[in-house]
Amino acid sequence: MRFCQDGMPTQRPIYKRYRTLLVSDAGAPFQAAEDVPRNWVSLGKRVIDVVDNQVRALRKCLLMNSFITGTRLGALWDIDANIDSFSAPAKLNCPHALTLKLAGLGTDLGEKDASTQDRLINLGYAVCDAAVRTYLDTSLAAPTGFPYPASGVG
């Protein structure tokens, strides 16, 4: 077993090892099911998805509470975040209707075409910037553009 300088095992959760946390949740947004599956396999998968969503929501709530109370510093952003909800000035242009389409893409880790990959990188960059400049360091300079300016997020 490997140990940190403080003598604690290295596999401790990041939350316990660091005070400043930058958290990106790029998982697929959870949506209500219009039709409940009737076969056991699909129903079992849906149950697992519901439980996973509840655990994620609880962890996000605890993390945000730690930011609010000052026990931790940092920022949290989601792939389906509306960039307009962040108070940072001079945010990059990310119309929510377009970013929701990107957020709805499968998170199967499968290969994406170059244009889609560029737009996903741009979205992550823009939302990360907005979250960090809203919650962690409001003195940071605004970005001058996307990493892939020709692609935008649309």
Image: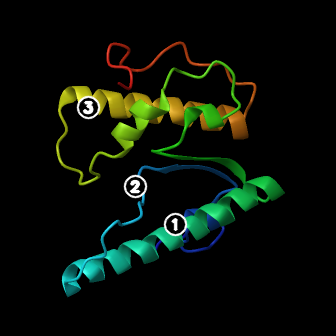
Mark 1 residue element: helix
| Residue 121 coordinates in the image, percent (x, y) | 37, 32
| Relative to 74, residue 140 above or below | above
Mark 2, residue position = 27
Residue shown at the point (74%, 29%) measured from the top left: 138
What amino acid type is highlighted by mark number 2?
Answer: Gly
Closer to the N terminus: mark 2 or mark 1? 2
**49 or 63, nearer to the observer:** 49
> Can residue 67 be seen at all in this image of the molecule?
yes
Label pair 2/1, CB-CB below 8 angstroms: yes
What amino acid type is highlighted by mark number 1?
Answer: Arg
Local crowd at mark 2 within 10 Å, few (<14), some, or many (≥20)?
some
| Relative to 66, residue 119 above or below | above
Q: How many numbered discs sit on the rendered protein?
A: 3
Residue shown at the point (42%, 60%) measured from the top left: 30
Task: Please state, as top left, top right, bottom left or bottom right, where the C terminus lies in the image.
Answer: top left
| Residue 27 coordinates in the image, percent (x, y) | 40, 55
Local crowd at mark 1 within 10 Å, few (<14), some, or many (≥20)?
some
Local crowd at mark 3 within 10 Å, few (<14), some, or many (≥20)?
some
Closer to the N terminus: mark 3 or mark 2? 2
Residue shown at the point (26%, 50%) measured from the top left: 106
Residue extending farthest to the front is 34
Q: Does 38 sit left or right of 94 as displayed?
A: left
Mark 3, residue position = 116
Mark identifier at residue 153: none
Mark 1, residue position = 56
| Residue 112 coordinates in the image, percent (x, y) | 19, 38
